[in-house]
Image: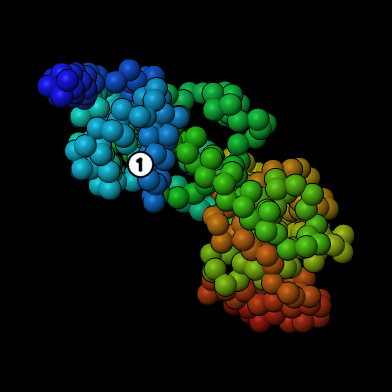
Amino acid sequence: MIKRIIVWGGLAIALASAYLFWYANTPLALQKTPLEFNLKPGSNLVSITSQMQASGVMSEGVRFRLLTRLMGKAGKIKAGFYTLNQAVTPLQLLKKLTEGEVSLREIVFIEGWTFAQMRDALNAHPLVRHDTLGMSEHEVLQLLHVPLEHAEGWFFPSTYYIDAGSSDVSILRRAYETMQLHINQEWAQRDKGLPYTTPAEALTMASIIEKETGVKRERPLIAAVFINRLRMGMRLQTDPTVIYGMGQNYDGNIRKRDLQIDTPYNTYTRIGLPPTPIAMPGLDAIKAALHPAQSDDIYFVAKGDGTHYFSNNLTEHNRAVARYQKNG
């Protein structure tokens, strides 16, 4: 009886080992190629296989987890963005993940860029596959399944790591999802009593703040000025929105007549926020829009060194203009 148990036990182990060997060396049925996926930092093995299942790398994760544990690799998988350009076996995939074969190549989207500038950077990048080349903005949004009429401002400026052959579609989707994450988190924690009814309005304000100053500590103050103006029914009178509304007519200079030509983005002729963001705001600008400084200032003027002088009445503001601009 004991001999029979030992024989059957040995046979079961042999069959299980043979099956696991077959699984480890059989290519996975990827949903598509190339296939990109991201493993988030701090993920455990169950979470890692769940992320790969959701991305179409594998249909279930039990066998891969078993293989990983048997090989002593459970704690050695590295987070990052991965690209599979062709089918791989579970053994090859595990090697790729534990050796951290993530891309160190990158594409950078700068805070304050427009969507057009972002697409120019994608189109110029030699490692990117240009699947959206020649598409209109509307067609790109449809391809991404983004329920928006305008793309401006809804893609997060940051550094994105890519593999050679990465589709511009996947990069755009990552930038859009990152912006969604940030704006929704900050919106949920926003200060009370702000004059916005939607996250989109807050994002529009953040884009204006982004274009008005590159000085981090000033952004909450800039936000306070514009929010105070909105509450008072004053026009925002911010040049960056006028420039955005001018489009290709902007030649690097803004003139008095430009401030008088009415467009949806001319905040000298119209009260309230413009209809859309005017650029890609960074996280600091988003935070400033939703957590402004406590201030009663309603004016600011550039001092010529990258910073601004703030004031809460027209007399003081006019003196600051005379000091910092009219007198050089």
Residue 122, quarter of the rendered image: top left
Q: Residue 127, position in %: x, y?
A: 30, 34
Pick whichever, 185 or 61, lies toward us: 61
Q: Is residue 205 visible?
A: yes
Pick whichever, 166 or 298, lies toward us: 166
- Tell me which amino acid carries mark 1: Leu
Dot 1 corresponds to which residue? 45
Residue 154, quarter of the rendered image: top right
Pick whichever, 302 or 77, lies toward us: 77
Name the residue: 73% across, 82% down: 319
User: In the current view of this chain or complex, which residue is farthest to the right?
Assistant: 233
Please tell me whether mark 1 sits on a helix, a strand or a loop. helix
Pick whichever, 85 or 131, lies toward us: 85
Q: Residue 81, position in %: x, y?
A: 35, 40
Identify the image quadrant of the C terminus. bottom right
Name the residue: 58% across, 64% down: 213
Name the residue: 27% across, 43% down: 74
